[in-house]
Image (cartoon, helix red, strand yellow):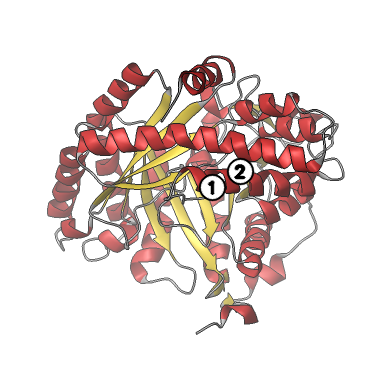
Amino acid sequence: MINIWEVKETNEMIEQENLDVRTITLGISLLDCIDDNLEKLNQNIYNKITTTAKDLAAVGEEIEREYAIPIVNKRISVTPIALVGGAACHTPEDFAVIAQTMDAAAKSVGVNLIGGYSALVSKGMTKADELLIRSIPIALCSTERVCSSVNLASSKTGINMDAVRLMGEVLLEVAERSKDRDSVDCMKLVVFCNAPDDNPFMAGAFHGVTEADAVINIGVSGPGVVKTALEKVRGESFEVLCETIKKTAFKVTRVGQLVAQEASRMLGIPFGIIDLSLAPTPAVGDSVADILCEIGLEYAGAPGTTAALALLNDQVKKGGVMASSYVGGLSGAFIPVSEDQGMIDSVQAKAITLEKLEAMTCVCSVGLDMIAIPGNTSAATISGMIADEMALGMVNQKTTAARLIPVIGKDVGDTVEFGGLFGYAPIMPVNTFSCEDFIRRKGRIPAPIHSFKN
């Protein structure tokens, strides 16, 4: 039973501490849309999305009104398009047409973003996978709502270095095509190691092939709630600190569970998972970096940062799994530079570097997230940065990801403004020593010995 004190407490978290449900994401399988005729395929995709998701935005708004819980985004994820379009698409341009169909369908049903313009290539690339990857610059720069992801590595198969090399080139092309808008379309592209099938957060969301025909996934977020709770136990022991985070995460996840159950009931679609990631925004008081400072660091990036982030992630997960039987997705802390004012402050104070962010990836999911780098960074260097992130995930048997933004025409010392929830970011310096000969090698890096568990 929920008592009046819990209701009051939840209202305070919403009104004063930036608690929100970051997204309701409706996953839709497009496997039954497959056709070898491109025009018929696109018609099938449009019809499936607009039929299945026709009530999603309205239901989200109704839940907001009834429970006074902010739901920031309503989103859709679909089956990885490389799988869906393989029979009909023979050129990158063919695949880009599907992206435009996805965009039109998303606009029609009133959702913010649609993910799943994706390929899963951790061991090798089919012709369709390669065509989709090469089409990403056209697709992202000709659509508004489409998000793209590519899974390049896994703990079971190793790192596909051919795909890593290709992604460095593709990312620079996306940056070049959108250079008149500060290379903003790079924000809609993320690369993964060990990508989960049920991630509701963009740009990495896609509907896994192991999922039902349609499913509701919820992403909750409450960095401000956690920080406020920790302010009340300032100076206390680690035991008190951990218990406070755990209890707070429990309360935040219960809010997500309520929204998930209501959305599932109203839409008549099964509930999938709750992702209880701490996802910041540029709003004051909604920062993961500020939580780390409340734990006892002068700035995020100071010695002890990785340990503090590990503690935070673990306690959030322990609290969350007690609040819902179906916790999934990433369920960690995002540390995007542009979307977190505390992270921006740390970069400007020179307290945090790319190398420190890479180390922090060991204990969270998306370590190099929304990182603006000089536009003259080479494709090989970008591929090297991606490979490092993939290696961390592969060896540690966890999800890792990178979302890099080479801003054409800007260099270290400049700032780029993305606007809205995406915030702004200082251009961060990149190690300029060459990794060209390493990246030029063909094939894949084998999975570590502990992957062999059959």
Residue 77 located left or right of residue 278:
left
Task: Give the SS element for disc 2.
Answer: helix
Q: Residue at x 18, y 43 (%)?
A: 46
**x and y percentages locating residue 340 in the rendered image:** 65, 30
Left or right position of 123 against 27:
right
Percent across and percent down for residue 307 are: 78, 49
Sequence-wise, which precedes: disc 2 or disc 1? 2
- Residue 383 or 70: which is nearer the viewer? 70
Residue 230 drawn above or below residue 13: below
**Residue 339 visible here:** no
Circle 2: is it few (<14), some (14-19), or many (20+) Cα within 10 Å?
many
Mark 1, other Cα within 10 Å: few <14 / some 14–19 / many ≥20: many
Residue 31 pos. (x, y %) = 22, 59
Q: Residue at position x 23%, y 31% from top?
A: 109
Q: Is residue 109 above or below residue 391?
A: above
Per the image, label 1 sits on a secondary structure element best described as loop
The amino acid at mark 2 is: Val
Q: Which label was assigned to residue 184?
A: none
Residue type of the residue flagged with mark 1 = Ser
Q: Quadrant of residue 101?
A: top left
In the image shown, does 395 or 439 lie closer to the viewer?
Answer: 395
Tag nearer the camera, 2 or 1: 2
Does 391 sit above or below residue 432?
A: below
Residue 227: x percent and y percent? 68, 28
Q: Is residue 26 visible?
A: yes
Asked whether the beta carbons under mark 2 and mark 1 sit within 8 Å of each other, the answer is: yes
| Numbered label attached to residue 331 | 1
Work out which quarter of the rendered image holds the N terminus and state it: top left
Residue 316's label in the rendered image is 2
